[in-house]
Structure formats: C-alpha cells, structure tokens
Amino acid sequence: MKRLPDVGKPTDNDAWTEAVKGVKRLPPKEEKPSPPLIIGEISPTVDYAKVYGGNSLEELTIGSTDNVDKRTAEKFKRGEFPIQKTLDLHGYFEKDAYDAVEAFIKNAYLQGLRCVLIITGKGRQKESDDWYDKRGILKESVPNWLNAPQLRPLILSFSYARPEDGGEGALYILLRRQRNR
C-alpha cells in the first residue's frame, strides 16, 4: 500500500490563519419568545344533566324511531342525513372496540355532530352441521353498548346502513342535538 505524503501540522504562518485573521464572530441571535398558548374551555366529559333531564330512557332497538319526530324519523330511515364521522371496527378486539365506540360517540356528541356511522362488519361465516351461521361478535355487541347508561342519553336512534354504506355490517347513529340549558 502506498503511503500518502506527510503534510505536516499547520503553523501560525499557514494560509488559513492569514485568511481568517481579521474575522470576528457574530453575536448570537436573540430568539423572540413564542406567544403563550391559549387553550379554550376544555369539557372532557359529557354533562348528562344537560343532555337529558327526563326519567329513564327505554332501550333502543335497531331501526326504532319512537322518540324522534316523524319528519326526522323518515329522513333518518331513508339515509338522508349526511354521515359526519365514521368509525371502522374491523380488526378490533371486543374490549378495545367498546372503548373506541364509547369515546367515538361522546366525542361526536361534544363536537355537535348529528349522524355518525359505525362499521362493525358482518362477521365470519362458521360452518355448523350443514348450515352456515353468520356470527359477528361486534355486530351483536354494538347495539347493546349503544344502550349503555353512559351512551344511551346521547342517542336518539340507530339503524342499519344503506348497502352502499355497509348494509347490515354498519349502523347509522342519530345523536341528540346539544341544547343550551
């Protein structure tokens, strides 16, 4: 292997030292402090006294619109409410799905949304004897969760979605309006 020639150590008479002889360091720039972060009022939970002041609520079933005025019920059944937010539960385990549904409904209500979509999926087909049973744990569980005491006051109605939105593997959920009381 060929050895490179030794160039030696720089001396005081080096060309670089001569070139930077009169150069002075600039003072450090002063950074302006960032404006303080102003956060509005945070309401992390739902005030159920504001949501519903009535007696007990009856359990909702898929497609029932008993506690909704006729015009709104017809519009909801035809799927004419725009879907403002969607939650897709494909790939969720049951415990995680419950937490996701609860947070999703509460956040949607706090954001003032009116109609949301939860996609549960239709479930897997399982062979038992000669018949195929459709079994979807989330499809069966989500309607029960929507009737839970922490979610039921926020919901007016829910029904299966139109085929283009998921059919029986998805639910439209009509949320109560926020009223200033």
Image (spheres, grey):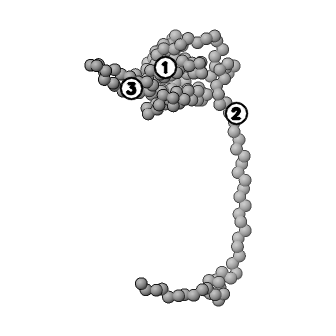
Q: Quadrant of residue 48?
A: top right
In the picture, residue 150 is in which quadrant?
Answer: top right
Q: Percent x, y for residue 142?
A: 48, 22
Determine whether the residue tagged by mark 2 lies in a helix, strand or loop.
loop
Distance in Å between CA atoms under marks 3 and 1: 15 Å
Of badges 3 and 2, nearer the viewer stands: 3
Q: Which residue is mark 3?
A: 123
Q: Which residue is mark 2?
A: 41
Residue drawn at x 41%, y 27% is 121
Which residue is depicted at the point 33% across and 24% down?
126
Which residue type does callout 1 highlight? Pro
Name which residue type carries label 2: Glu
Distance, label 1 to label 2, CA atoms, is 32 Å
- Which quadrant: the N terminus? bottom left
Q: Say which element carries label 3.
A: loop
Q: Which quadrant, please, contains the C terminus?
A: top right
- Residue 86: horizontal and vertical position, in percent? 49, 30
Which of the two residues, 168 or 41, is positioned nearer the viewer here? Answer: 168
Type of the residue with mark 3: Gly
Q: Are marks 1 and 2 in contact (CB under 8 Å)?
A: no
Which residue is under mark 1?
143
141 left or right, relative to 43: left
For mark 2, does the 10 Å Cα neighbourhood hold few (<14), some (14 to 19), or many (20 or more) residues? few
